[in-house]
Image (spheres, rainbow, N blue to C red):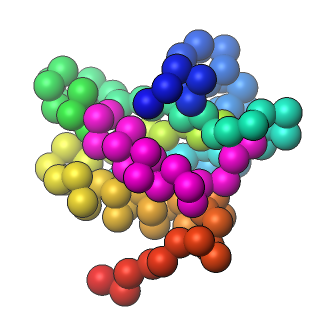
């Protein structure tokens, strides 16, 4: 994922937590903060040490980044998204992570529905 698509600074995370709207399911919490001046979306990832060791946490972050890469055309631009992973994510494979992320993004109305085909699985 390109650098301009990432949120890295603590104060940017804090602004998203304070001013963004939160949406959640069992696996993820997403804070969505509108940024009208931004051309594309940015994501910030938070995976707690409670979830697992460094290998597990990094794998979860790779899965989330890859899911966003695959959903890139469907995710609404002009937003900052902060994704917080919850404990059940530690045992999930990539397809389950992507499905769960798609679900919570759909709840957040962060997907362009006309472009995206939802499976009934």
| In this rendering, position of residue 44 left or right of residue 94 | right
**Based on the displayed image, in which of its 4 quarters is residue 36 positioned?**
top right
Vertical comparison of 53 with 42: above or below: above
Task: Tell me residue 48's x, y (percent).
Answer: 33, 28
Count of marks overlaid on the render = 0
Image: 61 above or below 13: below
**Residue 65: x %, y % from top left:** 38, 38
Residue 38: x and y in percent read 77, 33
Q: Is residue 78 left or right of residue 113?
A: right
Q: What is the quadrant of residue 16 in the picture?
A: top right
Q: Nearer the viewer, residue 30 or 50?
A: 30
Judge left or right: residue 4 versus residue 101: right
**Nearest to the observer: residue 68 or residue 97:** 68
**What residue sits 66% from the left and 14% below the top?**
11
Residue at horizontal 48 percent and vertical 40 percent from the top = 83
Residue sitting nearer the eye, 25 or 35: 35
Residue at horizontal 43%, vertical 45%? 69
Q: Is residue 48 magenta?
A: no
Q: Which residues are magenta?
A: 61-79
């Amino acid at each position: 994922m390109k650098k301009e698509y990432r949120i890295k600074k603590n104060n940017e995370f804090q602004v998203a937590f304070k001013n963004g709207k939160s949406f959640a399911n069992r696996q993820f919490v997403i804070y969505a903060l509108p940024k009208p001046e931004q051309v594309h979306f940015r994501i910030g990832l938070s995976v707690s040490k409670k979830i697992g060791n460094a290998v597990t946490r990094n794998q979860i972050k790779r899965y989330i980044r890859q899911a966003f890469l695959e959903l890139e055309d469907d995710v609404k631009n002009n937003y900052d998204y902060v994704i917080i992973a919850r404990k059940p994510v530690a045992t999930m494979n990539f397809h389950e992570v992507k499905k769960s992320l798609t679900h919570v993004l759909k709840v957040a109305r962060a997907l362009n529905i006309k472009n995206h085909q939802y499976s009934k699985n």
